[in-house]
Amino acid sequence: MHNPDSFNILIIDDSDLVVQPLTEALSDWLVPEHLLHASSVTSGLKLYRQSHPAVIVLDVRLPDGNGIDILTAVRQQDKQTKVIVLSSFDNVSHKKKFLEHGADYNTPWIKRKNYTKFPTLSKVSRR
């Protein structure tokens, strides 16, 4: 469903501690206008529908809902967009729940210095 003429990554997270370093790391792969950000379920779904990103980096807890809400809405319309769930919850049942709802990857939060070693982003962004 994403636009093949532009490769957009949509970060849906309400924490600047996550968004800022992730945006900086991704800017090595993409020009800034292809890095999009939303901080809630409502704004994330709106930006998703407007931009048709190739990749969504998704937080679990958001001010007006959670990542499952977004993941469910995206998967009802789109099976192509890659969804990477970043979470500080590193338990098996939590990961399984997101994977069952259609997440492509579920990874614990990664420290800024390790973003360049994050294989899922590098694989997805270089296709």
Image (cartoon, grey):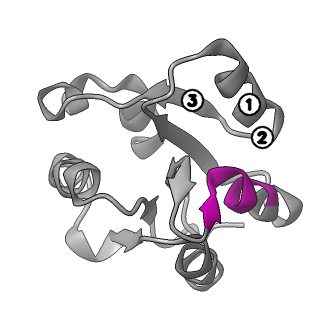
Can you give x and y, in whole percent of width and height, for residue 104 in the image?
Answer: 65, 35
* Residue at the farthest top position: 92
Residue under the image location 27 percent in, 49 percent down: 18
Closer to the chain start, of discs 1 and 3, is: 1
Residue indicated by mark 1:
99
Judge left or right: residue 8 versus residue 47.
left
Q: Could you tell me if the residues under marks 2 and 1 are in contact, i.e. CB atoms within 8 Å?
A: yes
Residue indicated by mark 2:
102
Amino acid, disc 1: Leu
Question: How many marks can you see?
Answer: 3
Kindly state the secondary structure of the residue where label 2 is placed. Answer: loop
Residue under the image location 20 percent in, 51 percent down: 17
Residue under the image location 63 percent in, 53 percent down: 67
Kindly state the secondary structure of the residue where label 1 is placed. Answer: helix
Residue under the image location 18 percent in, 57 percent down: 20
Q: In the figure, 104 relative to 50: above or below?
A: above
Distance between mark 3 and mark 2 Cα atoms: 10 Å
Residue indicated by mark 3:
106
Report if residue 55 is visible in the image: no
- The quadrant of the picture occupied by the N terminus is bottom right
Distance between mark 2 and mark 1 Cα atoms: 5 Å
Kindly state the secondary structure of the residue where label 3 is placed. Answer: strand
Residues shaded magenta: 65-72
* Residue at the farthest right position: 76
Judge left or right: residue 101 versus residue 59.
right
Amino acid, disc 2: Gly
Res 14 quadrant in image: bottom left
Can you give x and y, in whole percent of width and height, for residue 82 in the image?
Answer: 61, 46
